[in-house]
Amino acid sequence: MSAFLSQFINLLAAILLLLAFAMLSQRRILSLIHLFTLQGATLAVSTAVVGYATAQPHLYFSAVLTLLLKVILIPLLLHRVIDRLNVRWDLETLINIPTTQLAGIVLVMFAFYLAQPIAQISATIARGTLGIALASVLLSFMMMITRSKAVPQVIGFLAMENGLFFAATAATYGMPMVVELGIALDVLVGILILGVFLFHIREQFDSLDIRHLEKLKED
Amino acid sequence: MNAPGLFSQLLEVLIALALAPLLTGWVNQCRAWLLNKSAPPLTQPYRKLHKLFHKELVLAEHASSLYRAVPYLVFGCMALACAIIPTLSTDLPLSPAADAVALVGLFALARVFQSLAAMDVGTAFGTLGARREMLIGFLAEPALLMVLFSASLLSRSTSLTTLVDLFAHRELAIYPSLAFAGVAFTLVSLAENARIPVDNPATHLELTMVHEALLLEYSGRHLALLEWAASLKLFAYSCAGLALFFPWGIADARTPQAMLLALPLLAAKLTLGGALLALLETASAKMRIFRVPEFLGSAFLLAVIGMLVNILLGV
Amino acid sequence: MPLDCILSAVAAWLLIGIAGVAALRRLTLVAHLLFPLGGLAALLLAAGAAWALTQPPQTVVLPLGLPTLPFHFRLDSLSAFFLLVLGATAAGVSVFAAGYFRRGEGTPPGLLCLEYHLFLASMALVLLADDAYAFMVMWETMALSSFFLVIANHRLGEIRRAGYLYLLMAHLGAIAILLCFGVLQANTGNYTFDNLRAQQLGPFAASLAFLLAVVGFGAKGGLLPLHVWLPEAHPAAPSPVSALLSGVMLKTAVYGLVRVTFDLLHTPLWWWGALLLALGLASALMGVVFAAVQVDMKRLLAYSSMENLGLIFAGLGLAALFAAYDMRPMAALALTAALYHAASHATFKSLLFVATGAVLHATHERSLGKLGGLIRFMPWVAWITLLGTLASAGLPPLGGFVSEWLLLQSFLFAPGLPNGFLNMLVPVVAALIALVAALAGYTMVKFFGVIFLGQPREEKLAQARDAGWWERAGMLWLGGLCLLLGLFPAQVLLITNAVTRPLVGAALNTAGHDWLLVPVSLERASYGPVLFLLGAAACVAATFLLVRWRYHGRLSRVPPWDCGHPDLTARMQDTAEGFGQPIRQIFEPFFRMERELPSAFDAAPRYRVSVSDPLWHFLYLPLARAVEALARLVGRLQQGRIAVYLLYSFLTLIAVLLVVRR
């Protein structure tokens, strides 16, 4: 495999992290969905490139799957959800954005620190990508924590899955097809359930603020 | 110091002086098109400079000598910045005098002088502009430094000549850390050149202006120099960005003839860059001043992540 | 002999001090003869120190002090470097002081003269001391003489309070230093530095000694949790004394830490460097953020000193880190950056402090909110201060920029460290340093702009007169030093190289580049301030001449544009509080703020905001309360009856006898 391809995968990994970071500091739901779509597209391209570089045709298939699911289907669903719920605007976050960003930097450092020994012994295409994938997973997780509304949390969950998927393809050349299909289905079912869940929250509380869920606990 | 070096040095400064207003004019034209307005001619900035130079100088009655010196100082700083950045050739006699860090220092020097001058007359708007300018400056400056540093980590050098030589004359390689640096650099340049979303170059609405508030009391030849200096700054930033991220075509020290080829290439790159800048500006809305720290904080942190990625990946 | 030169300068200072007591209340004599003589002695000291840099170390044993414990003095390149800084700075400050002290301000002039010169002499001897005993005696003399100088205006309660806090912190530090020497001598009972150097301590004892040194010298140098005295004591002292406190005395802390870490202890451990780096950065950030919101000009400068010392300590930390991994050229680079910053801070901060003195004398106003527009009444002071301001803001082509440049360069080489975790921290640390430098620029624009530019905020400012010739001469000297340090870094490197070579075993490259600063190689980085200045000057001059030649020079003066608002007053300018507002908002978690907002219907609305140090509330006050509680507990022993006290003595005697018997 050429050095150029591995550099290209590294670049895609960096873009993935960049998008995860951008999502962390984004207030608007609409922009969040756009960023998520971009992330899905990056993921599809990187999967295809890994497939080409390692001559594993089944990765092409999962690239196409990613494209269909994460670039077209889920964003469409999300757009419909926010249209129906009428929540397209700025949302306040639980922790202010600069603090979140600083915490994000610490997370990135932590992830890189964890991944460094692996990067040194690993022999796969792009050695450093595991750290980046880990960092994107942590950043998405963090995004879920800091948002008070349900829709950004769903997007955070999906972005986290993107990070995991990237780790699986770039660091270990993909999982068996069955597992991948299973995960894809899981995500789809997950988003449907979450969609239903969202509508129910709104029916119940007339708002999507998940802080209302605190009222559900028994005293 | 050799003759071709001296020649390319002089040529660079002269070209920067000549082209900078043209770039501003081009961006304004593109913006007008995008906003569906009838565009001013490309030479409008030159006409404005000419008009201002001929007008009588009107000074506030208690303006000090510092106030009168600042337009020349700021203009000199920007001209020097254009001389340092390798735009056409990397063989510049002045380039060992200042590396990337000194370049940032030079911009900071100009900013400090301009803010001090704005405070000198002692009107409310001048001091307000100075405060906001310094606020933007202290956030943008470290971000810019970090952008240059992530490039420096790749080349193990802060010398701009070495940086450009490395990127331009080696086999094609993709540097992921530069992706972060590129985004951060774009954000910083928007803020530093008083563009939307941080500042609006076309506004004279007192409460929202930053850069215009600094110039509020200036007139005549002083204003002309400061306007020209602002154009030079935009030119310098564009050239620095091109040199870092798209360095192909810059002549290296051994082939001075290549400068002839470098000039049209530079013009093409600047045309494209200016159009892109206009597009970016029309696509975004001006933000509140206290969103600016967030905006520039992101740039700063992105540059830092770029450096982290560089250390992790080793490229 | 250089050492004789220096010792005679010190002796001259002591004699001048004694002469001051003899002429206790004769102001003219003291001010216009003794202080300039002190300045001459400082020049002699600086000359001796410069000479010593080219010579091998010299030692002398003076039969002073206790009969069996004579004072050992040694002049090596490290001492010589700091003596050079002391001498060069003190010369300017002494000349300024000749015109500064006026009649009727607290302590009589003769006594001030004694304290001032004793302070200078003790600082010089601290730098020369070659055994722990002499070091501690001189260290305490320095602390006491500066304490008396700080409380020169002792009739004011707040000044007495500041002095008390200063003395307290100085003694806490001194105890730590004493313990540090105790650990270093490793039970040999011999406290000469030669013996301390010869001891090979285990990692535990060495780390203990290092930590004690950090506490001791950190307390003197304003390192993070121990900085509280600094913003209190500096504004309280008369301005020339503040200049010495900030410009020179804080550097003795740097000297002490370098001496212990790089000379007495041999190879640092990596976490020492990391700790020092972290503490230094934290103090730098804290200092600059607090400096940006101050409204008192001397407090602003005091916090800025904390920032600069933080940067110096960070440089030392980085040097220790490199030295721990045996990367000697890099260690030399970081150490040079720290030393360079120490030298340039000494010059520009002394200049700024004496400038505040000149402003204070002309206006009797320390609060930034009541100054403004002084550049028209005090052009000399304003223009020289501008030099110091630019240097302090870390802008080229002045001294402050060179040291920040060197520091950033040394970070650029840090990714070679064989430790993944530290490598990750490097970008973050470099970013913080850049942020601190940029914030320093903000602070300095506020400092200069609010004092010297704009319109006078009070009527009486129009009566301000420019400083006298003595003061101008002193300021010119200090401003010239700022400029020299900025323009000739390659020549200054010759001096710092003499220091780093024996300490870390490497030095920076200076060969072949007289006008360029090239620490490693031309491809890596270079900076040529003279070329830079010439380039800028050529651009400025060409523009000026072209504009003059091509266009007319007509000019008319009118009132400033009032934006349609009819009566523009000076009170509409940004105040110092206003200038600090963005910083207060962005760095809110750093501060403890108390706001008092008027209601919308107030007839006479008042707005008040006070910013204080959260550490004071979370660390010092609880500590003070704990000490007080403990003292009350001990206080129960006090009964007021003689018989009980006799009983205590009796019991003590019995206990001592028992111990002796064993």
Image (cartoon, coloured by chain):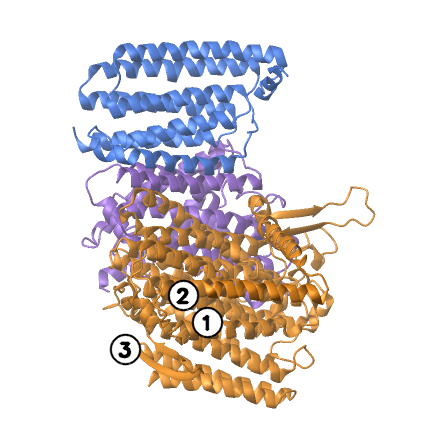
Q: Quadrant of the N terminus of chain A?
A: top left
**Which chain did the image draw in orange?**
C
**Which chain did the image draw in purple?**
B
- Of all chains, the one bearing label 3 is C
Residue named by callout 2: C181
| Left or right placement of residue B168 versus residue C318 in this view | left
Residue named by callout 3: C56
**Which chain did the image draw in blue?**
A
Which residue is at 52% across, 77% downward? C119
Q: How many numbered marks, from 0 up?
A: 3
Residue named by callout 1: C136
Q: N-terminal of the two: label 2 or label 1?
A: 1
Query: Residue A37, can we see it?
Result: no
Tag 3 and tag 2 share a subunit: yes
- Of all chains, the one bearing label 2 is C
Q: Mark 2 near mark 1, Cβ–Cβ under 8 Å? A: yes
